[in-house]
Image: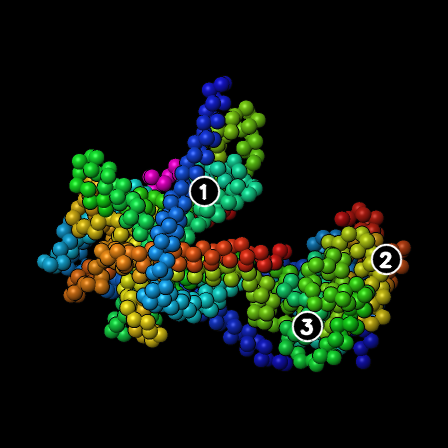
Amino acid sequence: MVDHYSKKELIFKKILFLSGFFIIALLFTIFLTLIVSSFPSIKAFGLGFLSGKVWDPVFSQYGCFPFLLGTLITAGLALFLSFFFSLSISILIGEYLKKGTLPFLLKGLIDLLAGIPSVIYGFWGLFFLVPIVQKIEVFLGITPYGVSILTASLVLSIMIIPYSASIGREVIGLVPSEIKEAGYSLGATRYEVIRKVILPYAKGGLSAGFLLSLGRALGETMAVTMVIGNSALLPKNIFSPGNTMASVIANEITEATGKLYLSSLIEIGLVLFFLTTIVNIMGNYIVGRVKC
Amino acid sequence: MENTVLRTENLYAYFGEHCVLKNINLSLPYNNVIAIMGPSGCGKTTLIRCINRMHELIEDARIEGKVFLQGEDVYSLDPIIARRKTGMVFQRPNPFPTMSIYDNVIAGYKLNGIKINKSERERIVEDKLRKVALWDEVCNCLHKRGTFLSGGQQQRLCIARALSLNPEILLLDEPTSALDPKATSSIEELIIKLKESVTILIVTHNIEQAARVSDFTAFLYLGELVEFGKTEKIFTVPSDKRTEEYLTRRIR
Amino acid sequence: MLIRIIKNRLFFGAIVLFSIFSIIPLFLILFFIFKNGISSLDFLFSSQILNAIVGTFILIILAGIFSIPLGILAGIYLSESKGRLVYFVRLCVEVLQGIPSIVIGIIAYLLIVVPMRGFSAISGGFALGIIMLPVIIKSTEETLKLIPYSLKEASLALGVPYYKTILKVVLPAGLSGILTGILLSIARVSGETAPLLLTAFGSCFMNLDISKPINSLPLLIFNYATSPYQNWISQAWAASLILILFVLILNIIARLIVKRWRIQF
């Protein structure tokens, strides 16, 4: 009986199991570390942290609301602005031009858009978009900061197009040809089949794509922090400078003196973690269901 | 002293609670071609997979009874060792895509870390490729990938690979069902030639193929060994009514 | 009837228009970087930029050491094993992938920078490794899932033990897919800035000591682009050009070249 094979097999299977287990352990470590390090801040402010409108390190007053608002507005606005663009790409490559070099090229360009580092988006935003926004603000008679919630939303909207576009394309391509043909055989035009047959059928997958885009926008740091103005005050309108949760962490964490300051920043990280995780799980769940 | 290369004793095979082989008792003589035929789902593939212990790789699969290879109880050995004593060829040709033709033939040695020197290696490769009538076609491109060959050539490569470890029995699981008629007949010719050096057990759903290549035939139906005997006899005067109905295509 | 046909044409036109508009920013950005980068060519290899390039490579290597072996093993685990735990691990991978990079930076800060009492390349490599991990795991799993069972069977029938079958037959067959995943994850983290702000931190000095702070291209771009000095801004353009070319080339190699090596089954 040669037993050393079964021993090696066992070791291999154990190593595989351990690597899987390590992933779970890693995630839980991340989660626990965030919670434990947020404790001082949680104890000090409780749930009021989320609604606290004042962020003042000098007086040790920490309220997350301006940043929560900034995150939700920029991400929501970015999603709104990008909606028709990514939907168009999904429909174009998923339905009209499924094969050939043109969709291949288009797909490659969209992937390239996703591959550009966010700091370069920020750099471009700072030197190209900000002056444009300034001109608009001058035209409207507002203080021409240039950096604002609007600028950040504009950059974000461009950045998140590829995510919803690629999932949307897949989902629209998966619509069975039987039901499309049923539409055509009733005399519908292509537009009508898309609007009344394909899109409703692909509704689930498309919303999953937009959810994942949203998740990306919520967590984006660099491009936002370079064009949003980094103000801790509540923004008055989209032309005001503001800040997001990700951006304020990046800006202030290395200069955070004092346990409470650091802990509050980490608690913001915890809130961001929850927000993005929920959005991503929802999006992935729907994608999983659609793809089956 | 065993004069049968393979013997099964009251062999039962299960997938969980579902019994797919019932009380199989077979004795196979050396250097013959034995065909196992029967309708789909009768357990033919399961039977040969019980011989080289591939059946137990599936979750919840198990056997009862015994299988003797040249008198040795297959289930008392390490499954790895047992598998090396048999060679198996599958329905779809599956040469290793990352290896050359040369490396495919000696894959049994290479992957198992069995050390052989270069001249021995070359001898084995040439010998086995000649045995499967592939040598002349590939001797100039031994270091090309095996996937460039045609279906029939790939299947012959797989047979050479299975033969490289000098197994006591060669198990063929519907080896020609994915091949075109020309490749099929060349493989059938090969099988008849090979029986001089190794015993061959071939599973086939093609009645005519069983008649063409085999010396002995076993008919399996719903997991039971209905009849076993010389091919001539089974095909002309079958003893069991079910065999007759299968041969005349009343059972499928 | 005519209205419907007009609507149909208009719709198609609108779709095409919107699609083209989506690509315009890509060209604007590339044009912006290339134009300004090329006009700053004399800054192209200033000492700071060389420093940053070396730093980026060191960080990628550190991140790779942490994430590549672990990622491939976990990918094998997910594609080969069964059970409830597998489902849970897969869920964790999805969650990990969605965590904003700044939050990962916080973790690396708390777990490594604080105990080590200082910023370091190690902490930066760790953070980048966590970001690379889900991509490598997923691409490994998906590649291995596409490999037909018959390949494993052929090897097992030859009496090759299971672990050798995986390592010597299945993994090599999936090499191109796994390599693509690794290259794409490297392309992704080479542009990451946020987690490095609080781990690698950046440095003016060229040093190979991984327990000290280290600079990287995206860090340099961030710091210099937001500075008031024209000299530094020009360096930021040059660095952006280098970074974009690097990311572009990696993407091209991964998608067009390595994918060609893919074994068709």
Residue C147 in the figure: left or right of residue C88 = right
Secondary element at tag 1? helix
Q: Residue at x 68, y 75 (%)?
A: B109
Side of B245 where C265 appears, left or right: left
Q: Amino acid at mark 1?
A: Gly
Query: Percent x, y for residue B57?
Result: 61, 65
Chain letter for mark 3, please: B
Disc 3 residue crowd, few under 14, some 14–19, many 20+, Cα 10 Å: many
Left or right position of A140 against A58: right
Specify the quadrant of the image occupied by residue B45.
bottom right
Is label 2 or label 1 in front?
A: 1
Find out whether residue A83 is within the magenta segment.
yes
Q: Position of residue B121 (x, y in %)?
A: 72, 76
Q: Which residue is mark 3?
A: B108
- Depth check: C261 or C247 in front? C247
> Which residue is denoted by mark 1 in the rendering?
A168
Q: Which mark is residue B212?
A: 2
Position of A235 relative to A255 (above/below): above
Q: Which residues are magenta?
A: A79-85
Residue depicted at 41% across the width and 36% down the height: C18
Q: Does dot 3 land on a helix, a strand or a loop? A: helix
